[in-house]
Image (spheres, helix red, strand yellow):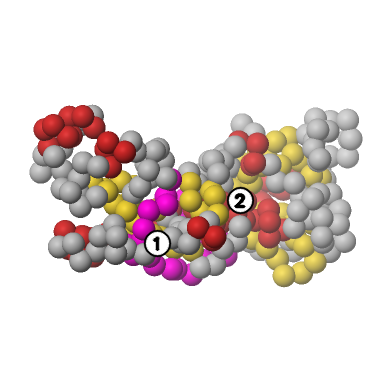
Amino acid sequence: RVYVECTPPELESTLRPDLCITAAYGQYLPKRFLAMPKYGTLNIHPSLLPRWRGASPVQRSLEAGDDPIGVSVLFTVSKMDAGPLVSQEEHKAHPNDQATVVLPYLFNVGTGLLLDALPKVISEEITMESATTQNEDEVTLAKMIDSSEGELTVWNDSATTCHNKVRAFSDWPGTYMFFRFGDDDTSDPVKVKIIQTQVLEETAVPTNQIELGPKKGDGLRIVCADGSILECLLVQPVTRKVMDAKSLVNGLQGKTMQWVQPPDAE
Protein backbone atom coordinates (compact mmCIF):
# COMPACT_ATOMS: atom_id res chain seq x y z
CA ARG A 1 0.00 0.00 0.00
CA VAL A 2 1.13 3.53 -0.71
CA TYR A 3 -0.42 6.47 1.19
CA VAL A 4 -0.10 9.83 -0.48
CA GLU A 5 -1.04 13.15 1.09
CA CYS A 6 -2.14 15.63 -1.52
CA THR A 7 -4.52 18.52 -2.18
CA PRO A 8 -7.69 18.24 -4.33
CA PRO A 9 -5.96 19.75 -7.40
CA GLU A 10 -3.15 17.19 -7.03
CA LEU A 11 -5.72 14.41 -6.70
CA GLU A 12 -7.30 15.51 -9.94
CA SER A 13 -4.09 15.89 -11.91
CA THR A 14 -2.03 13.05 -10.46
CA LEU A 15 -4.12 10.25 -8.99
CA ARG A 16 -7.50 10.62 -10.71
CA PRO A 17 -9.29 8.43 -8.14
CA ASP A 18 -12.14 6.12 -9.15
CA LEU A 19 -13.74 6.38 -5.71
CA CYS A 20 -13.22 8.49 -2.58
CA ILE A 21 -14.26 7.58 0.96
CA THR A 22 -14.70 9.90 3.94
CA ALA A 23 -15.58 9.35 7.60
CA ALA A 24 -15.81 11.81 10.50
CA TYR A 25 -14.62 14.57 8.17
CA GLY A 26 -17.06 17.24 9.35
CA GLN A 27 -16.30 19.75 6.58
CA TYR A 28 -17.91 20.61 3.26
CA LEU A 29 -16.18 19.17 0.20
CA PRO A 30 -15.95 21.48 -2.81
CA LYS A 31 -17.92 20.54 -5.92
CA ARG A 32 -14.65 20.27 -7.86
CA PHE A 33 -13.51 17.53 -5.48
CA LEU A 34 -16.83 15.69 -5.63
CA ALA A 35 -16.72 15.70 -9.43
CA MET A 36 -13.34 13.93 -9.57
CA PRO A 37 -13.98 10.27 -8.73
CA LYS A 38 -15.70 8.20 -11.41
CA TYR A 39 -17.93 6.36 -8.92
CA GLY A 40 -18.44 9.22 -6.50
CA THR A 41 -17.52 9.77 -2.88
CA LEU A 42 -18.92 7.57 -0.12
CA ASN A 43 -19.27 8.62 3.50
CA ILE A 44 -19.84 6.67 6.73
CA HIS A 45 -22.17 8.66 8.98
CA PRO A 46 -23.05 7.34 12.48
CA SER A 47 -26.78 8.05 12.53
CA LEU A 48 -29.97 6.89 10.87
CA LEU A 49 -30.15 9.60 8.24
CA PRO A 50 -31.93 11.87 7.61
CA ARG A 51 -32.04 12.06 11.42
CA TRP A 52 -29.01 13.87 12.83
CA ARG A 53 -27.26 15.43 9.90
CA GLY A 54 -24.25 17.44 10.95
CA ALA A 55 -21.24 17.53 13.22
CA SER A 56 -22.36 15.59 16.32
CA PRO A 57 -24.75 12.79 15.31
CA VAL A 58 -23.90 10.22 17.99
CA GLN A 59 -23.90 12.78 20.79
CA ARG A 60 -27.23 14.25 19.74
CA SER A 61 -28.86 10.84 19.29
CA LEU A 62 -27.79 9.76 22.79
CA GLU A 63 -28.79 13.11 24.27
CA ALA A 64 -32.25 12.66 22.75
CA GLY A 65 -32.51 9.11 24.07
CA ASP A 66 -32.91 7.60 20.60
CA ASP A 67 -33.56 3.88 20.34
CA PRO A 68 -32.69 2.48 17.88
CA ILE A 69 -29.48 4.19 16.86
CA GLY A 70 -27.55 3.31 13.72
CA VAL A 71 -25.18 4.11 10.91
CA SER A 72 -25.56 5.09 7.26
CA VAL A 73 -23.38 4.83 4.17
CA LEU A 74 -24.22 7.48 1.62
CA PHE A 75 -22.98 9.29 -1.45
CA THR A 76 -21.52 12.68 -0.60
CA VAL A 77 -23.08 15.75 -2.20
CA SER A 78 -22.37 19.43 -1.68
CA LYS A 79 -25.09 19.70 1.00
CA MET A 80 -24.01 18.34 4.40
CA ASP A 81 -24.98 14.66 4.86
CA ALA A 82 -27.82 15.00 2.34
CA GLY A 83 -26.72 12.50 -0.33
CA PRO A 84 -28.65 9.37 -1.33
CA LEU A 85 -28.30 6.35 0.97
CA VAL A 86 -26.36 3.28 -0.13
CA SER A 87 -27.06 1.27 3.01
CA GLN A 88 -28.18 1.72 6.60
CA GLU A 89 -28.29 -0.46 9.72
CA GLU A 90 -30.19 -0.04 12.98
CA HIS A 91 -28.92 -1.16 16.39
CA LYS A 92 -30.65 -1.20 19.75
CA ALA A 93 -29.33 1.42 22.15
CA HIS A 94 -28.41 0.26 25.64
CA PRO A 95 -29.72 2.88 28.13
CA ASN A 96 -26.31 3.28 29.79
CA ASP A 97 -24.00 3.21 26.74
CA GLN A 98 -21.87 6.33 26.36
CA ALA A 99 -20.63 8.11 23.24
CA THR A 100 -17.07 6.93 23.82
CA VAL A 101 -18.31 3.36 23.27
CA VAL A 102 -21.09 3.97 20.73
CA LEU A 103 -19.09 6.09 18.29
CA PRO A 104 -16.31 3.56 17.51
CA TYR A 105 -18.86 0.74 17.52
CA LEU A 106 -21.01 2.43 14.88
CA PHE A 107 -17.99 3.28 12.72
CA ASN A 108 -16.96 -0.37 12.88
CA VAL A 109 -20.44 -1.41 11.74
CA GLY A 110 -20.35 1.28 9.05
CA THR A 111 -17.01 0.01 7.77
CA GLY A 112 -18.59 -3.41 7.25
CA LEU A 113 -21.52 -1.86 5.40
CA LEU A 114 -19.12 0.10 3.21
CA LEU A 115 -17.06 -2.97 2.31
CA ASP A 116 -20.24 -4.88 1.45
CA ALA A 117 -21.42 -2.03 -0.78
CA LEU A 118 -18.16 -1.40 -2.67
CA PRO A 119 -18.57 -4.14 -5.32
CA LYS A 120 -22.05 -2.90 -6.15
CA VAL A 121 -20.83 0.69 -6.41
CA ILE A 122 -17.86 -0.25 -8.61
CA SER A 123 -20.10 -2.38 -10.86
CA GLU A 124 -22.56 0.54 -10.95
CA GLU A 125 -25.36 -1.63 -9.60
CA ILE A 126 -25.66 1.17 -7.03
CA THR A 127 -25.20 4.71 -8.31
CA MET A 128 -26.00 8.21 -7.15
CA GLU A 129 -29.20 7.96 -9.17
CA SER A 130 -30.34 4.54 -7.93
CA ALA A 131 -29.51 4.95 -4.23
CA THR A 132 -32.29 5.86 -1.78
CA THR A 133 -33.15 9.55 -1.65
CA GLN A 134 -33.41 11.00 1.86
CA ASN A 135 -36.77 12.35 3.00
CA GLU A 136 -36.21 16.07 3.58
CA ASP A 137 -39.33 16.26 5.78
CA GLU A 138 -37.62 14.01 8.34
CA VAL A 139 -34.34 15.91 8.62
CA THR A 140 -32.99 16.60 12.12
CA LEU A 141 -29.81 18.63 12.54
CA ALA A 142 -26.99 17.60 14.91
CA LYS A 143 -25.59 21.00 15.81
CA MET A 144 -22.05 21.39 17.11
CA ILE A 145 -21.67 20.95 20.86
CA ASP A 146 -20.85 23.93 23.05
CA SER A 147 -18.91 23.50 26.29
CA SER A 148 -21.69 25.27 28.20
CA GLU A 149 -24.01 22.32 27.48
CA GLY A 150 -22.10 20.16 29.95
CA GLU A 151 -23.76 21.51 33.09
CA LEU A 152 -26.45 19.23 34.52
CA THR A 153 -29.41 21.43 35.48
CA VAL A 154 -31.16 19.06 37.85
CA TRP A 155 -33.37 21.89 39.13
CA ASN A 156 -35.00 22.05 35.67
CA ASP A 157 -34.57 18.59 34.12
CA SER A 158 -35.49 14.98 34.77
CA ALA A 159 -33.02 12.26 35.73
CA THR A 160 -33.38 10.74 32.25
CA THR A 161 -32.54 14.05 30.56
CA CYS A 162 -29.45 14.49 32.75
CA HIS A 163 -28.38 10.87 32.34
CA ASN A 164 -28.62 11.12 28.56
CA LYS A 165 -26.39 14.21 28.64
CA VAL A 166 -23.78 12.26 30.63
CA ARG A 167 -23.93 9.52 28.00
CA ALA A 168 -23.77 11.94 25.08
CA PHE A 169 -21.00 14.21 26.32
CA SER A 170 -18.75 11.52 27.85
CA ASP A 171 -15.88 12.37 25.51
CA TRP A 172 -16.27 16.16 25.29
CA PRO A 173 -17.15 18.48 26.94
CA GLY A 174 -18.06 16.14 29.81
CA THR A 175 -20.79 16.92 32.34
CA TYR A 176 -20.57 18.56 35.74
CA MET A 177 -22.41 20.00 38.73
CA PHE A 178 -21.48 22.14 41.72
CA PHE A 179 -21.50 20.50 45.16
CA ARG A 180 -21.21 22.11 48.58
CA PHE A 181 -19.62 20.00 51.31
CA GLY A 182 -20.67 20.68 54.90
CA ASP A 183 -23.40 22.88 56.43
CA ASP A 184 -21.70 26.25 55.89
CA ASP A 185 -23.82 27.99 53.23
CA THR A 186 -21.07 30.58 52.71
CA SER A 187 -18.44 28.03 51.68
CA ASP A 188 -17.48 27.94 48.03
CA PRO A 189 -19.12 25.20 45.98
CA VAL A 190 -16.84 22.65 44.28
CA LYS A 191 -17.11 21.75 40.60
CA VAL A 192 -17.58 18.00 40.26
CA LYS A 193 -17.46 16.16 36.95
CA ILE A 194 -20.17 13.55 36.59
CA ILE A 195 -18.57 10.59 34.84
CA GLN A 196 -21.09 7.73 35.00
CA THR A 197 -24.75 7.67 36.01
CA GLN A 198 -27.91 5.65 35.86
CA VAL A 199 -31.60 6.40 36.42
CA LEU A 200 -33.37 4.74 39.33
CA GLU A 201 -36.94 3.50 39.03
CA GLU A 202 -37.99 5.05 42.34
CA THR A 203 -38.91 8.70 42.95
CA ALA A 204 -38.59 11.11 45.87
CA VAL A 205 -39.56 14.59 47.01
CA PRO A 206 -37.25 17.12 45.28
CA THR A 207 -34.36 18.28 47.47
CA ASN A 208 -30.84 19.56 46.99
CA GLN A 209 -29.45 17.13 49.57
CA ILE A 210 -27.20 14.40 48.10
CA GLU A 211 -27.03 11.02 49.80
CA LEU A 212 -25.24 7.75 49.18
CA GLY A 213 -27.50 4.79 48.43
CA PRO A 214 -27.91 2.17 51.19
CA LYS A 215 -26.44 -0.85 49.41
CA LYS A 216 -22.86 -1.76 48.54
CA GLY A 217 -21.96 -0.31 45.13
CA ASP A 218 -24.72 2.32 45.23
CA GLY A 219 -23.97 5.81 43.97
CA LEU A 220 -24.81 9.35 45.00
CA ARG A 221 -28.55 9.94 44.73
CA ILE A 222 -29.63 13.27 43.28
CA VAL A 223 -33.35 14.06 43.19
CA CYS A 224 -34.23 16.01 40.05
CA ALA A 225 -36.95 18.58 39.38
CA ASP A 226 -39.71 16.04 38.74
CA GLY A 227 -38.77 13.77 41.63
CA SER A 228 -36.87 11.27 39.46
CA ILE A 229 -33.54 10.12 40.86
CA LEU A 230 -30.18 10.34 39.10
CA GLU A 231 -27.59 8.01 40.63
CA CYS A 232 -23.99 9.14 40.15
CA LEU A 233 -21.66 6.13 40.15
CA LEU A 234 -18.36 7.79 39.18
CA VAL A 235 -17.44 11.41 39.87
CA GLN A 236 -14.36 13.62 39.75
CA PRO A 237 -14.06 16.66 42.03
CA VAL A 238 -11.87 19.38 40.57
CA THR A 239 -8.10 18.60 40.90
CA ARG A 240 -8.92 15.03 41.99
CA LYS A 241 -8.94 11.67 40.21
CA VAL A 242 -12.07 9.87 39.08
CA MET A 243 -13.59 8.00 42.04
CA ASP A 244 -16.64 6.00 42.96
CA ALA A 245 -19.34 7.51 45.12
CA LYS A 246 -18.30 5.67 48.28
CA SER A 247 -14.75 7.02 48.04
CA LEU A 248 -16.04 10.58 47.78
CA VAL A 249 -18.28 10.15 50.82
CA ASN A 250 -15.49 8.54 52.86
CA GLY A 251 -13.26 11.53 52.17
CA LEU A 252 -15.85 13.94 53.55
CA GLN A 253 -15.53 12.46 57.07
CA GLY A 254 -19.20 12.83 57.88
CA LYS A 255 -19.85 16.17 56.17
CA THR A 256 -23.17 16.61 54.39
CA MET A 257 -23.39 17.18 50.65
CA GLN A 258 -25.70 19.37 48.56
CA TRP A 259 -25.92 20.33 44.91
CA VAL A 260 -25.78 24.07 44.31
CA GLN A 261 -27.47 26.04 41.57
CA PRO A 262 -25.06 28.67 40.18
CA PRO A 263 -26.25 32.28 40.62
CA ASP A 264 -26.45 32.85 36.85
CA ALA A 265 -28.43 29.64 36.19
CA GLU A 266 -31.91 29.87 34.76
The three-letter amino acid code for the residue at tag 2 is Val
Which secondary structure lies at badge 2?
A: helix
Residue at the front extreme of this rendering = 129
| 83 is within the stretch colored magenta | yes
**In the image, is 246 to the left or to the right of 181?**
left
Split into 4 quadrants, where in the image is the C terminus? top right
Q: Tell me the residue that label 1 is attached to.
A: 133
Residue 238, position as x, y percentages in the image: 64, 34
Q: Quadrant of residue 239?
A: top right
Q: Which mark is residue 178?
A: none
Determine the residue positioned at 40% across, 38% down.
Answer: 27
Secondary structure, mark 1, is loop
Residue 165 place in picture, x, y as percent? 62, 51
Residue linked to disc 2: 166
Q: Crowding at label 1, few (<14), some or many (≥20) Cα neighbours within 10 Å?
A: some
In the rendering, at what x and y percent does residue 152 appear? 70, 46
Residue for point 36% across, 58% down: 84
Left or right: where does residue 242 sit relative to residue 24?
A: right
The magenta segment is 80-102
Which residue occupies the foreground of this view, 124 or 224?
124
> Would residue 98 appear left or right of 155 to someone viewing this image?
left
Mark 2 closeness class: few <14, some 14–19, many ≥20 residues within 10 Å: many
Q: Quadrant of residue 216?
A: bottom right
